[in-house]
Image: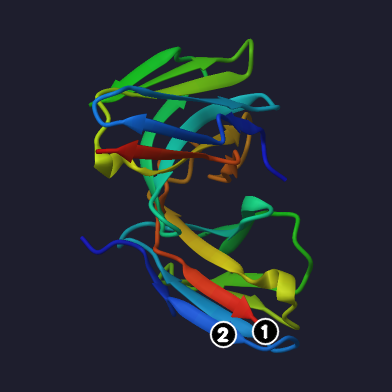
Amino acid sequence: SQQGEEDPQALSIQEGENATMNCSYKTSINNLQWYRQNSGRGLVHLILIRSNEREKHSGRLRVTLDTSKKSSSLLITASRAADTASYFCATVEDKAAGNKLTFGGGTRVLVKP
Amino acid sequence: KAGVTQTPRYLIKTRGQQVTLSCSPISGHRSVSWYQQTPGQGLQFLFEYFSETQRNKGNFPGRFSGRQFSNSRSEMNVSTLELGDSALYLCASSHRQGPNTEAFFGQGTRLTVV
């Protein structure tokens, strides 16, 4: 079963605009990760934020984590047509053995040139 | 460095048949996980192997099985295929054993059961 939900399910923006998507999860986590998937292909890791971190940046990506609300957000600034993809959050449960990822339902992002 | 390689890329099978999918992880990675992706259920964890041992198993019927070899390559097998097994099967490898490590995914095997 999925860990939680992502919001919105789909997002359409113009190139240059910012895109924000949110992820909620249900259990206590060790870390939360964001992945990108282009059109039914493999997933690409974007960023990992640990449960004791509140914000993390990587290039045009900014991720926040609020463990009290069990939620995270991904912000893509100055979006490009190449950012068109589905974005998934995934959690690793606290005290979990191994690297089992529990994914959200994903947000489909369309960046129009 | 070569990425995660999954073979075959596409597969069409008939109900009742069995299928074996293969995954070669990134060189040096000892953890391999499998996921099933469908439009209805999304991305679901199947199992994870580390050093030839199954470390985690998802909530799938016993028709789904896997194994890992000494060179870290992994296979998953689905027996008595059902229409609902049609999906994109993704393999991921990780370098470290612990949870704070990114997963590198292959391009997937798209299985269609007719």
Front in this rendered view, residue A55 or A36: A36
Question: Label 1 is placed on what type of residue?
Answer: Val
Q: Chain of mark 1?
A: B
Q: Sequence order check: which comes first, mark 2 or mark 1?
A: 2
Residue A101, position in %: x, y? 56, 43
Residue A101 seen? yes
Residue bearing mark 1:
B114
- Label 2 vs label 1: CA separation? 7 Å
Quick check: B82 above or below A44? Answer: below
Which quarter of the picture shows residue A4? top right
Element assignment for label 2 = strand
Residue bearing mark 2:
B12
Quick check: B69 above or below B55? Answer: below
Residue at image coords 59%, 62%? B53
Residue at image coords 48%, 76%? B22
Question: Label 2 is placed on what type of residue?
Answer: Ile
Left or right of residue B97, residue B15 in this image: right
Front in this rendered view, residue A111 or B101: A111
Left or right of residue B80, residue A40 in this image: left
Locate the C terminus of chain A and report the quarter of the image it occupies: top left
Quick check: A72 above or below B13? Answer: above
Question: Is the residue marked by circle 1 packed among few (<14), some (14-19), or many (20+) residues within 10 Å?
Answer: some
Left or right of residue B104, residue A73 in this image: right
Element assignment for label 1 = loop
Q: Chain of mark 2?
A: B
Which quarter of the picture shows residue A5? top right
Residue A58 seen? no
Q: Is the Cβ of the residue at disc 2 closer than 8 Å to that at disc 1?
A: yes
Residue at image coords 61%, 83%? B19
Locate the N terminus of chain A and report the quarter of the image it occupies: top right
Left or right of residue B3, residue B70 in this image: right
Residue at image coords 53%, 77%? B21
